[in-house]
């Protein structure tokens, strides 16, 4: 992505040109000289867009977390500034720490299984075999389906009375599981979320595997290393950079999940995470019926800070990987 | 297709060692088919339920013995307006995303933009911001501007899912365009805009297709913005809300619901059949490139 400064072709000098970049030497071709104004002009729609559609809502969100908003605020416009009071209220609320715990379980269990299954499949698909491309393509389906579609399907499969999952378990004499009740809902939404995340892991890890030279494996098998040994001595160590990126992105994407949980359980019981909590306080048709924008924004702001931190870590990891190369 | 992306998604070729390999390859195909079947079982189940007559749904048969299309006709008669809205929102999002991201990709990759590193960082972080946070902010702004429950409002919000990704994809591809091409255009006296429109854009067609496909699919699939910014939009709500209505209903009707879900999955199917290679390229480009 370095700026392109092309070599000058002989005999075709253009000595003058509008929009000269500062510090540009004469006698060079008129652009591809980097020109500040032109670059800005092309980027302007994006810059304006980022300011209006990213920064503004985010500022709005943070501001809401510092003002006490109520339903009436939308009519009267009155929302007194209260500093970090609402942060204190949210963090000391009895729901806060259990929700953090559930979020952590949801994220860690999802990531672990998505990664392990995704990696196993990537290794499985590494060498071409008949139909491998088609099958690999089909594995993308869960990732491409609208979440409302997969969410409702899982919800029906997990129905306690007539869901296929309980019927299947019944063959082995297992009693019906109340998948979606308060106690089990965290496990159920995690299962569905793992299913959703496998394709993403598979695709990224697969492309990572393609960059490992086949010679290494040939040499290893000449030395008598079996598939297991090859995996631990070649595949896994060489895949570390890709693994880091995959897990990092997976963490961020899983942390912000609302839709699959909301569609399956409305974030009830143990399936409440920070993201669904924020959603339900602001938009939920919750049982309480009380809309709490400021509290929702506080949780949102916490999530935002985590996302920002992850962005920095992502960048640092990427830099280090580029330096190593 | 982008050169850098193509290398990532190209398949490795099996080296020599024929006979044994061939036999093992068919073994792998068998296992692969089984794994895929397990993975796609929920999708099969959705189709199965959508074809099962109403009175047989609760018995959870593995196969629709008396397949019926009644759920589909019911779904279509109810959901047509929502499908129309979704189509409109999807196309609007595609147009807006392309309009903003193509020039920006050109600027970021080939022209001098001050603060390019900060911009790149913002694009990465933008993709990490939880949608619920965005929705909270948008809700506040939209209710002040009184554009809640409108199609343009939803298009604007949905485009935020796609724009950062699109800029990164375009700039990754455009960075690989040979400099000689752009130079030739300049020598012929083309302006930057002309170079962009007549040289860069036509070459970047595949990137544009990838961006368009993803932008459409994401807008089509969006639940979060639709359920927050467009809750009371009546017929101006997208198909995801049409399905969501079933969940809230007293007596959840699984047949029509699953039929609607199948219909809502059509763009996914199209994407897979028409554009699988773009999809794989898109996933890897969005995640591991910048």
Image (cartoon, grey):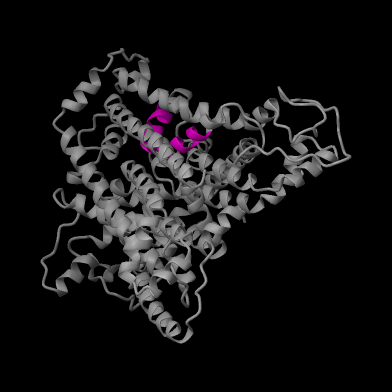
Instruction: Tell me if residue B61 comes above or below residue A232 in the rendering.
Output: below
In this rendered view, identify the residue nearer to me: B112 or B76.
Answer: B112
Residue B260: name its quadrant.
bottom left
Magenta segment range?
B120-140
Q: Residue at x 23, y 17 (%)?
A: A85
In this rendered view, identify the residue nearer to me: A122 or B99.
Answer: A122
Provide residue A223's location: percent of width, then percent of height: 37, 73
Determine the main secondary structure of the stretch shown in magenta: helix
Provide residue B222's location: percent of width, then percent of height: 43, 46
Instruction: Tell me if residue B255 comes above or below residue B152 in the rendering.
Output: below
Q: Quadrant of the N terminus of chain A?
A: top right
Q: Is residue B74 magenta?
A: no
Instruction: Tell me if residue B68 comes above or below residue B1 in the rendering.
Output: below
Q: Residue at x 24, y 43 (%)?
A: A267
Instruction: Tell me if residue A63 comes above or below residue B198 in the rendering.
Output: above
Q: Is residue B124 magenta?
A: yes
Q: Residue at x 51, y 62 (%)?
A: B272
């Amino acid at each position: 992505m370095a700026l392109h400064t092309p070599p000058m072709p002989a005999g075709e000098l253009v000595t003058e040109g509008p929009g000269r970049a500062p510090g540009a030497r004469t006698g060079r071709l008129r652009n591809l000289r980097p020109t500040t104004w032109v670059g800005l002009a092309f980027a302007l729609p994006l810059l304006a867009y980022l300011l209006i559609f990213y920064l503004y809502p985010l500022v709005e969100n943070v501001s809401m977390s510092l003002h006490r908003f109520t339903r009436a605020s939308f009519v009267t416009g009155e929302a007194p500034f209260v500093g970090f009071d609402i942060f204190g209220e949210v963090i000391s609320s009895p729901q806060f720490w259990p929700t953090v715990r559930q979020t952590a379980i949801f994220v860690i269990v999802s990531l672990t299984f998505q990664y392990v299954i995704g990696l196993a499949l990537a290794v499985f698909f590494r060498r071409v075999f008949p139909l491998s491309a088609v099958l690999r393509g089909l594995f993308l389906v869960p990732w491409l389906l609208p979440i409302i579609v997969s969410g409702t399907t899982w919800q029906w499969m997990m129905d306690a009375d007539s869901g296929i999952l309980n019927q299947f378990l019944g063959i082995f004499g297992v009693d019906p599981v109340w998948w979606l009740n308060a106690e089990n809902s965290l496990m159920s939404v995690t299962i569905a979320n793992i299913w959703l995340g496998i394709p993403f892991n598979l695709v990224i890890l697969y492309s990572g595997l393609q960059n490992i030279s086949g010679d290494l494996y040939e040499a290893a098998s000449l030395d008598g290393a079996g598939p297991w040994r090859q995996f631990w001595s070649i595949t896994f160590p060489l895949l570390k950079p890709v693994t880091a990126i995959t897990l990092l992105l997976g963490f961020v994407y899983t942390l912000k999940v609302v839709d699959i949980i909301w569609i399956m359980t409305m974030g009830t019981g143990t399936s409440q995470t920070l993201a669904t909590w924020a959603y339900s306080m602001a938009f939920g048709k919750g049982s309480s019926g009380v809309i709490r924008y400021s509290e929702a924004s506080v949780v949102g702001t916490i999530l935002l800070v985590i996302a920002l931190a992850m962005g920095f870590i992502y960048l640092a990891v990427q830099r280090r990987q580029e330096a190593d190369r | 297709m982008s050169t850098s992306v193509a290398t990532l998604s190209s398949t490795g070729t099996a080296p020599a060692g024929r006979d044994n390999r061939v036999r093992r390859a068919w073994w792998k195909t068998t296992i692969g088919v089984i794994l895929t079947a397990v993975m796609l079982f929920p999708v099969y189940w959705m189709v199965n339920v959508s074809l099962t007559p109403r009175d047989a749904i609760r018995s959870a048969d593995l196969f629709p013995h008396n397949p019926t299309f009644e759920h589909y006709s019911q779904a279509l008669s109810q959901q047509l307006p929502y499908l129309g809205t979704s189509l409109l929102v999807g196309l609007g999002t595609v147009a807006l995303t392309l309009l903003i991201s193509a020039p920006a990709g050109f600027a970021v990759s080939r022209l001098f933009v001050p603060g390019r590193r900060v911009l790149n960082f913002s694009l990465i972080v933008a993709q990490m911001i939880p949608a619920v946070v965005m929705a909270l902010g948008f809700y506040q702004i939209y209710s002040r501007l009184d554009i809640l429950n409108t199609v343009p409002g939803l298009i604007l919000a949905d485009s935020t899912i796609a724009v950062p990704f699109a800029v990164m994809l375009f700039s990754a591809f455009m960075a690989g365009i040979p400099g000689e091409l752009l130079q030739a255009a300049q020598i012929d006296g083309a302006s930057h805009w002309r170079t962009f429109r007549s040289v860069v854009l036509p070459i970047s067609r595949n990137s544009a297709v990838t961006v368009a496909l993803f932008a459409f699919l994401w807008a089509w699939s969006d639940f979060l913005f639709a359920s927050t910014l467009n809750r009371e939009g009546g017929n101006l709500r997208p198909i995801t809300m049409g399905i969501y209505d079933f969940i809230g209903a007293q007596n959840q009707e699984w047949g029509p619901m699953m039929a609607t879900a199948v219909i809502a999955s059509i763009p996914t199917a199209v994407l897979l059949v028409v554009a699988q290679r773009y999809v794989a390229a898109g996933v890897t480009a969005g995640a591991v490139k910048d």
